[in-house]
Image (cartoon, grey):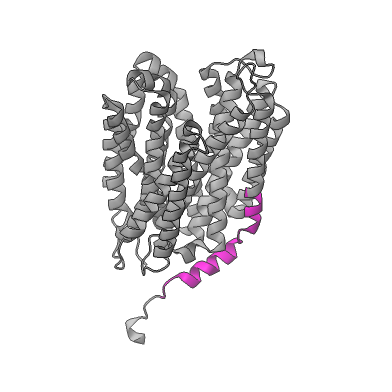
Amino acid sequence: MWGVRRAEPGGRGLVALLAFLGVMAYSLAMAVVTPALPLLQSGLRTTAAGAAWALTAMTLSAAVSTPVAGRLGDLYGPRRVLLAVLGVATVGMVVAAAAPTLPVMLAGRALAGVGGGVFPLAYTIVREVFPPARTASAIGLMSSMLGLGGALSWCVAGPIIDLLGWRWLLWLPVFGLVPGLLAAWWIVPEAAPRPAGRVDWWGAGLFAACLVAALTALTQGMAWGWTSPGVLGLAGLAAVFAAVWLRVESRVTDPLVDLRLMRRRGVWTANAASLLSGYALMAGGILFPLLVQLPESTGFGFGGTATQAALLQIPASIGMTAAGMTCGMLDRRIGSRAVLLLGAVLTGAGYAFVVVAHHEMWQLYVGGIARGVGLGFAYAAVATLVVAAVPAERTGVASGINTLLRTVGASLGTQVSAVIVAASATAATGLPAEGGFARGFAVSAAVMGGVLALALLAPRAGARRRACRAEAPAEPAPAAER
């Protein structure tokens, strides 16, 4: 088995800090465009749909590049691939921040989306640098950076836009990525010798085509209409690409995604839980702000500003971060499977609470914080479960697929929740009805019920370790025994 050189105890903290900051910088880059969308629309003289593509372009690029970067990291070592990923993402963020037109902006955001590869690469580095007893703590803390990056984007959006302008909001991730690139070159240890391998470029191309078609259909469903020829055609095209890709991956000797590995109980349960948890995260990101900003004349809205809606998200993000930080301790005491159970119960309870209690702001805060803490546990647990369930040389691609499915779930959460709310709009006012929000929260609670069931199906730690030992290649015999 190959890997990066195991760092000395004093250097592990620097490697971990770099991985954490890289994940946070990327999550900030992904989230920071959302508060700027209305101003981006007017600044680049485009439509609301055109401005929304600034987010969609990065999402699509990240979905395609994440598993590919994970596989490249497994083959060529995480350090060199991490440097390449951070370099491309930095160039993309610079292009997007300085873009004079929408097409240039979209090109920059697509390049920045390559930074999604930081997730599987960071998981690989942590697994190789840290001893097994510390891996869960490091992965949990890294997962918490997702919440911290999102919270930071909402905290700084208002002051930066008011004082400096919306473009400076897009420059903000660059100030984190440039030092991160230099620090990665200096801190991350080089890979040790590794077995020969190759990249399944045919599989990667088919995989990318399938994802682009499917995610474009999801993200544009509301704008084009769910039964429009464009959406139905893209969905059919995605199905064709998926069928061809599955056939290719089952026949090549060194596939991009080892389908046998993905069928392992510890892997598929964690991947399905990641998909559903991504839904629950972004569903709340749509439902809570919409409810806060709905006019008081509806009888249930709060007539709040965008700033007040953002303030509602901050405690949940802080709770998500704090939960991720404590996940390692809980993992050592009760195991990742139990942590996922806890996360599913808390998140589902938070959503169930606001189904019936959403008429006071404190009720939204209570439900939102329970949701944030629960998702912090769930995100950290699924990452740990995947890393523990696969051989070390497959960590990158396995965690890349897990991250990809979270992205797909997030797209589903955004679109499905928006459709549920929009479908409840009354003809008289054009505004959503209270029942639409209740149904949206109830669907999210039911989704977390699915995560609860998956957590119960996940294997216990002992079973995961035995499965990994069975997959691990045999150590060569000492010379004296040959």
Residue 345's spot in the image, x, y percent? 67, 44
Residue 62's spot in the image, x, y percent? 38, 43
Q: Quadrant of residue 301?
A: top right
Front-most of residues 467 and 2: 467
Does 186 sit above or below residue 8? above
Q: Residue at x 64, y 35 (%)?
A: 370
Quarter of the C terminus within the rendering? bottom left
Left or right: 364, with 268 as reference point? right
Q: Residue at x 61, y 29 (%)?
A: 423
Number of numbered discs on residues: 0
Residue 205's spot in the image, x, y percent? 34, 54
Front-most of residues 174 and 50: 50
* Outermost right residue: 356
The question of residue 56 being in magenta is answered with: no
Residue 326 seen by the camera: no
The question of residue 466 being in magenta is answered with: yes
Does 316 sit above or below residue 474? above
Does 56 sit above or below residue 404? above
Q: Which residues are magenta?
A: 451-474
Q: Quadrant of residue 356?
A: top right
Q: Residue at x 51, y 19 (%)?
A: 306
Residue 230 seen by the camera: yes
The majority secondary structure of the magenta stretch comes to helix
Residue 7's spot in the image, x, y percent? 36, 55
Does 133 sit above or below residue 286? below
Q: Residue at x 37, y 55 (%)?
A: 206
